[in-house]
Image: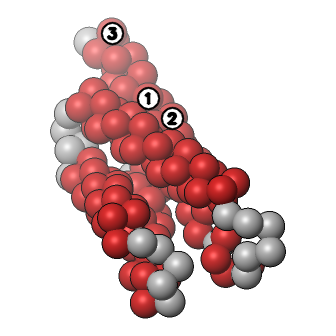
Amino acid sequence: MIQRIQSFYLFLVALLSLGLIYGVQTATLGLNFQGSIAMLVFGEGLLGALLAVGSVFWYRNRQNQFVVNRLNLITQLFLLGFFVYRSLNISGEAAASEKGIGMLIPIFSIVFLVLANRAIKKDEDLVKSADRLR
């Protein structure tokens, strides 16, 4: 069901992940990323976007949707850890764009994934309470 709030959160995660992919591609043109690192970030961003969009359409099985969101959360945490590691290894005199504001994208994605999981849990509790009344 597209009209649920967790669908909105998951679409935001997908848009943020696609924005991250776009940012990596433009940074690669500026030679800030090496090839294999850019491919790693590109793959993780694409995986995050695909998991988020796929999770929207698994609304009938909320448990699987919850598990896929947790997998996406782990992916985003890995990506955030990679960005933090990379920013700590760049010299202090690097340009601000080289350290990048793109490091905030996984943080926002994590927040939206947590909000989506809360909404899924709330829906699951509502369905279980309705089943008790029957």
> From this viewpoint, is residue 8 visible?
no
- Residue at image mark 2: 118
Residue lying at 19% horizontally and 39% vertically, measured from the top left: 60
> From this viewpoint, is residue 21 visible?
yes
The furthest residue to the bottom: 29
Up/down of 92 relative to 57, above or below: below
User: Mark 2 and mark 3 in contact (Cβ < 8 Å)?
Assistant: no
What x and y, as percent, mark residue 62?
28, 33
Between 111 and 128, the residue placed more toward the observer is 111
User: Is 88 situated left or right of 129 in this image?
Assistant: right
Disc with the residue nearer the chain's start (3 vs 2): 2
Q: In which quarter of the image is residue 97?
A: bottom right
Q: Which amino acid does label 1 sit on?
A: Lys
Measure the C-alpha gap from mark 3 to mark 2: 21 Å
Disc with the residue nearer the chain's start (1 vs 3): 1
Residue lying at 34% horizontally and 17% vertically, measured from the top left: 128
User: Mark 2 and mark 1 in contact (Cβ < 8 Å)?
Assistant: yes
Between 13 and 115, the residue placed more toward the observer is 13
- Residue at image mark 3: 132
What x and y, as percent, mark residue 65?
28, 37
